[in-house]
Image (cartoon, rainbow, N blue to C red):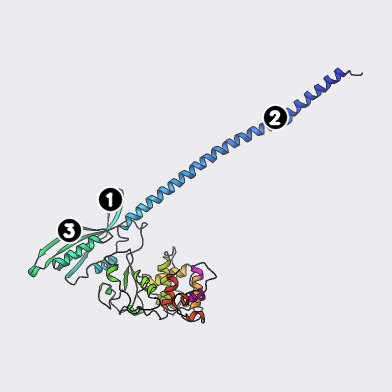
Amino acid sequence: MKLTKREKRAVFFLMAVVFLGAYYYFLLTPQLAKLQDAKYEKEEAEEKLAEYYIAVNLEEQLDKTIEELNQKVKTASINYFPNIQQEEIILLMQDFLDAPELQVSSLAFSQPRVETLGEASLDAMGLNIAYEGDYQALNGLLKKMWDFQKKIIFNNINISSKDEGLLTGTIGLDFYHLPDDVEAEGLYDWYLDQNYKKANPFRAGSSERGGSANYIYKAGESLLLIDRRYKAFEDIQGHWAEEEIDAFGAMYYIRGDRDDCYYPDDSMTRGEFLLLLDKVFKWTDPEESVDLSKFEDYENLGNYENAIAKAIYKGFYSGFIVGYADKTLRPQAPITYQEVEIVMRKVLEDPGFQWKQIGEEILREKGIHSIGVDNIGHYITKAEAIYLLYHL
């Protein structure tokens, strides 16, 4: 049967409708469903992203708040003592009680105690000082303690008059410090070495020449202690490295002998160089214990409280120094330019560091020729080592 044109158009239209219906049902509808699902997922992702940004901003605000609070705690802790130890308090009193007109017959410490201040706990220790002296000496002592940057609490002062204008009595003091996790560094560093083993370790209080310190105050710039104690070394005037040596001396990175001489052209030892690095870079204490007993000359390091021994422990722990093949560390042995190169490459993380560059700089700036430029195996001088670290 032959279809008319009208019937053909009707059939074509019907087929088009069926095709479009099938396309919509089988292809377009699933795509629309997927599109809707994707839209929902996008909205959820945008919500999560918004929550993430809010959390990040909140975390940043919290970090900033924590940092500000930590800074406030750190600032507050500066006013207190880093620890409550009789040894450090005795050294501090040694610095305070240096007036010959004031005689102290006894220092009586109380047992350490814990005091509660609001929600905070502070460690405390008391000290009772029995004294005798004139008014000026007593007034000078009190003023030193009042002006000291750490809080020293006076809980009582007893004064009695004797003949010839002398005063006697007692002074009761309290020392406080915040928890150990706030501030760990002490007030003093000991310098105990071979030359001082039989010397009086408390000579630091002497204001005369020859009173070179076996210990140094390191807890900040105190006009009370630093200005009084530091004197330029006797043998550096006119030396090519006078400026650098004097600067390190003023910061107590280095010390002289009993005659206040530094001998800048002498060789620097391995221990002295490590100590300078420790001072300049402010190395932190090892998180784990360091066992150096495997070295034959381990006993030459001295006690861990020895400042040079501390620096060697830190340097060895950080991998800046290693021992010799004969299982020695040789802390008292002079250090060569080549050894300085090896150490500085590690410390500075600069494999291209060479002493030759420093030697050429010394020649250019100071007019001094360094032996290390020609002989890398020779020993570096104290002045050269200080010049190197001062100009980093």
- Looking at the rendered structure, the secondary structure element under dot 3 is strand
Start and end of the magenta stretch? Answer: 345-361
Please tell me which of labels 3 and 2 falls first in the chain. 2
Which residue extends farthest right?
A: 1
Question: Which residue bears the numbered disc 3?
Answer: 156
Upstream in the sequence, badge 1 or badge 2? 2
The type of residue carrying mark 3 is Asn
Q: Which residue is at the front of the view, 372 or 240?
A: 240
Residues tagged 3 and 1 counted as in contact (Cβ below 8 A): no
- Look at mark 2 in the image and give the residue it sits on: 29
Helix, strand, or loop for circle 1? strand
Is 184 situated left or right of 90 in this image? right
Mark 1 touching mark 2, by CB under 8 A?
Answer: no
Determine crowd level at label 3: few under 14, some 14-19, many 20+ residues with C-alpha closer than 10 A: few
Quarter occupied by residue 82 = bottom left
Q: Quadrant of residue 13?
A: top right
Callout 2: SS = helix
